[in-house]
Amino acid sequence: MPQWLVDWRQSLAFKLMVSYLLAWGLAAALVGVAVWVALQFQPADSSFRNAQRLTRLLGDSLVFDAQGRPQRIDGMDRLEWLTRALPDDFSYRVSDRQGRVFLSSTTAVGVQPEPPHPLEGHTLLIEHAGQTWEVHATVSQRLIDLIHLSADHHLRGVALATAGMSILLLGAVLWVVIQRLLRPLREASAQAMQINPQQLSLRLEEDDLPGELKPLVRAFNQVLDRLETGFRHQQRFLANAAHELKTPLALLRGQIELGGAHQTEQLLADVDQLARQVQQLLLLAEVSEPSNFKSETIHLMPLAHEVLGFLEPLARQRGVRLDLHFSDARTMVAGDRMALFALLRNLVENALNFAPAHSTVTLVLNAQSLEVIDQGPGIDPAHVAHVFDRFWRHPERRSHGAGLGLAICREIANAHRWQLTAHTRQPGALFRLEFG
């Protein structure tokens, strides 16, 4: 089968056309069956009812002269051949109450012999100009059957012709309508084909789209917004990472070229610092993707003791005391345990970097939040908006980190839909993580 035919059979236009024509054909078949049943099952007294209708028709077509006497039956001249050709099957008579005949078919005058087939007759009384007139008509069952047979054939022919013409006409109209309805979708597809990494700002137009397609296009545009944001972040991240690693690598190379063999300890310290920066970059890339997390129920108290125990050597080196306060030792939270450990470790380590000697860094556990408090210089109000930015460093920071610790904390919090905020105190700073 040709590919174009396969594509056409799978298209929305083809499915709509087939569904419509099948539905129309079913409806037409039901109507046809109903008509056939109505024609096949005629009541037994149909000839009598036809005689009644014929009599009323003659009465309605009766034309009187100026003296109020019946002059003619309007349109009967076209049926005179019937009374002559089938005198035993159709006749009529118009007379007054005294029996005087004014209008009649040829066979209606005088006494006629008994016909060889059954007839049905009916008499209608008409009042005109103060006088009563009798309109009498007779019709045979075989003539009625002949008329019905002719009408049936004619009706079937008209029905078939009408069905065929309506299928063609409605199919053409439906094709035009489908093409007009799908034109905005084709235009949107053409616009989507133009979107590439160099043109991520392009969006699909929604103005001329049908209402049923607007939610789909709007959702697609929102996906493009997120993709563009992620792509810009990745570009900026790679540029910043390259910039941050370029300088220490250059310094390390210079130290080696200037006699690095006699600076083993310094070279190892620089290599450790580079390794730490690379590890933080990898961790930041990992925590930026929520699908990497595995949610579980975390008991905060043991996790907090684990973090403080991990950082106790660094605190002793800095001459800082670590303290833990809690309102409820049974506090639980849902999230990735390793990610929350990294978040707490970075917050406490950041506090140690600014805490003066002989001061205290406090970790406070509440029912729906936790806080890390130090007694350092605090956060300048001008710097609050930047503390969670990637590669940003506080001007008074004592360590030589890459400025990624708090950025990692924010990525972990955002991935878990937690709220991480920074506040300045007198003295010190406070970082609050809300789990609600």
Image (cartoon, rainbow, N blue to C red):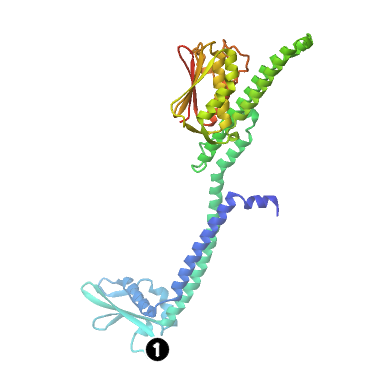
> What is the crowding at mark 1: few (fewer than 14 residues within 10 Å), some, or many (at least 20)?
few
Q: Return the residue nearer the eye: 398 or 25.
A: 398
Q: Is residue 328 left or right of residue 246?
A: left
Residue at (54% x, 17% y) in the render: 351
Rendered location of residue 77, percent (x, y): 40, 74
Residue 75 sits above or below residue 228 on the image: below
Residue at (46% x, 75% y) in the render: 40
Residue at (59% x, 52% y) in the render: 14
Instruction: State whether residue 63 appears in this view.
Output: yes
Residue 174 sits above or below residue 198 on the image: below
Instruction: State whether residue 392 appears in this view.
Output: no
Rendered location of residue 156, percent (x, y): 50, 69
Residue 427 sits above or below residue 194 on the image: above
- Which residue is under mark 1? 115
Q: Quadrant of the C terminus?
A: top left
Residue 268 placement: quadrant: top right
Residue lying furthest bottom: 113
Amino acid on which the number 1 mark rests in the picture = Pro
Residue 122 placement: quadrant: bottom left
Q: Return the residue nearer the eye: 14 or 96.
A: 14
Q: Return the residue nearer the eye: 143 or 196.
A: 196
Q: How many marks?
A: 1
Rendered location of residue 27, percent (x, y): 49, 62
Q: Helix, strand, or loop for circle 1?
A: loop
